[in-house]
Amino acid sequence: MQKQMFRNNTKNIQYPGGLAVRPGEARMIDECFCPQDKPEVFKVEDILGLSVPKAIKEIPNLSESQLVLVIVAEEAMDKPRKGILDAFGDKLDLIQAEKATEMVVEHLETLEDSDLQEMLLDDEYSEDDKSQMQSVLDDRISEEVNKTEDETDSSDD
């Protein structure tokens, strides 16, 4: 059986597997005696119970779906807090914009170079769109240059 580090972070002596471990100490014990870490359960109430500045500090720790839950719950309150709605909404907008950009780039990567070049000349597309198209083309050129350099290096050996 494998051993695992058991650290006693309580104020009392713990006895995992019959071994005494004093507060603040650690010992290697059979893993079957180690407490299993349970994933933390997200509770909207935990965020709603915080002040606006403290709730905003939690934003980086939350997933997209958790942000949505907080926004919906905050909107349902008698007096929704604008600071929370704005900050959580801004983060949600950013995540969704990043996803949309990824989807556009994935689509652009499926197009031929000639199609991308034609699209770059078309006034129908915004400067942001054209920037993404140019980036895809630049990446392809860079890959080709690297591939050529690698082939040249290997033929020199």
Image (cartoon, rainbow, N blue to C red):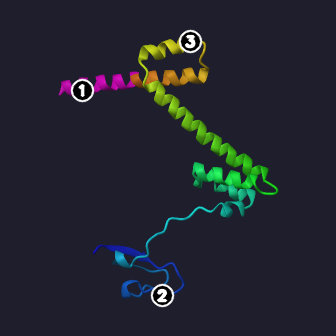
Residue 154 in magenta stretch: yes
Q: Which mark is residue 126?
A: none
Q: Residue 43: where, in percent of width, then height? A: 62, 63
Q: Which mark is residue 122?
A: 3
Residue 48 in magenta stretch: no
Q: Residue furthest left?
A: 157
> Which residue is identified by label 1?
153
Three-letter amino acid code of the residue under disc 3: Asp
Three-letter amino acid code of the residue under disc 1: Asp
- The answer to whether 84 appears left or right of 106 in the picture is right
Q: Residue furthest right?
A: 79
In the rendered image, the quadrant that contains the N terminus is bottom left
At 46% across and 15% down in the image, what residue appears? 115
In the rendered image, the quadrant that contains the C terminus is top left
Q: Residue 92: where, in percent of width, then height? A: 63, 44
The stretch of residues the image draws in magenta is 141-157
Nearer mark to the viewer, of 2 and 1: 2
Q: Earlier in the sequence, mark 1 or mark 3?
A: 3
Instruction: Compute the Cα span from label 1 to label 3.
Output: 39 Å
Three-letter amino acid code of the residue under disc 2: Ile
